[in-house]
Image (cartoon, grey):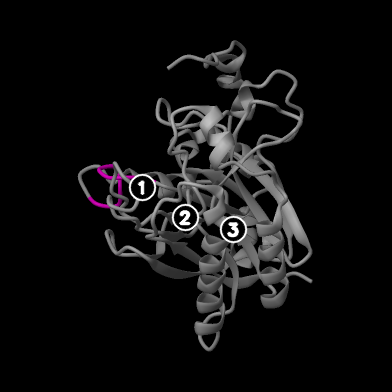
Amino acid sequence: MSIPRYYAAACQTDLPCPRDRKEIPERVGFLLGMIDRAVVGYEPFFDIKLVVFPEFAHVAPIYETVDELTDRLAIPIPNDQTDRYQKKAKERGIYIQTGTFLEVDPKWPGVVFNTTCLIGPDGLLSKYRKVNPWIPWEVHASPHDLLGYDEPLFPVVDTEIGKLGAAICYDWLFPEPLRALALAGAEVLIRVSAYMDPWGATPPMDWWTLFNRARAVENMAFVVAANQGATASNYPPFSWPGGSMVVDFDGRILAQADPGSGEKIVVGPIDIAALRAERSRRRGHDLLGHIRAEAYNHLYTKPIYRPGRS
């Protein structure tokens, strides 16, 4: 059954940065509590069906080497914690875009991924592994750089609440990842982010707001963007402005947390029926339909990014 209209909750956090994977279960317990607060607390007003958490909601790549990340923070997926999210998704009848895990996969020894999961009532629906690590700070791998990597780089999942696709933080500064999701049918683009000052939600360098709105317009899609709201004392060396938001397919900000507001739940409407109607009827500003790909596809015929370049 399709649910054409519902609400999404973008949950930003302000929590201490974990130093060891043993801290993850307690962290997930807190985040499950935020889900209950969003779904149950707002139930008289909003039918929340999608809950999104920020990058580093579980752990951040705070160590300088892959070996240290593997030894102390990284875990396989699925795991006991994704099982807990699935149980909550089934209990509440919702879809959850998790904050990121640092992931190890026996198929790729010696590699750590920065990964977010889409989890629904029936289980783990997709994993998105960050394609564009924030160089030079993030030492985890991009699946793009692995010889023989054969899983979808930009998975889109068709659900009862629409076609959902996610990308992580720095990915959003590039138009191509979100265009890849949109061309695969994504109707809701989910941003799982830890976007720090000064590139936050306030002028003169409010890149957070700029790129969220631009990606919504150029792909004629809703954007649900959850950002870290942590203070510098919790996630040094940066401060994290939050500003989590929901944006419609014309770039309108439907809901947004005040910048610098720390922990926050932001609730905004998603109207898949309206989006589909506009995608089918619109002739002007139909940015997906008006792509003249052949005019510039040749620009991508040779490798531009080479692994190891910084």
Distance, label 3 to label 1, CA atoms, is: 26 Å
User: Where does the image place residue 90, in percent across and percent down from the top left?
Assistant: 73, 72
Q: Foreground: 125 or 290?
A: 125
- In the rendered image, the quadrant that contains the N terminus is bottom right
Count of all numbered marks drawn on residues in the image: 3
Q: Position of residue 183 (x, y in %)?
A: 65, 40
Q: Judge whether residue 54 can be spotted in this image.
A: yes
Asked if the magenta segment contains residue 163, the reply would be no
Give the residue type at disc 1: Trp
The residue depicted at 37 percent of the width and 65 percent of the height is 263
- Element under disc 2: strand
Q: Which residue is mark 1?
A: 208
**Residue 41 - label:** none
Which of labels 3 and 2 is toward the front?
A: 2
Task: Provide the major secondary structure of the magenta segment.
Answer: loop
Q: In the image, is 56 to the left or to the right of 151? A: left
Which residue bears the numbered disc 3? 278
- Are dots 2 and 1 in contact, CB under 8 Å? yes
Picture coordinates of residue 237 (x, y %)? Answer: 29, 41
Q: Which residues are magenta?
A: 195-202
Mark 1 Cα shell of 10 Å, populated few (<14), some (14-19), many (≥20)? many
Q: Which residue is mark 2?
A: 225
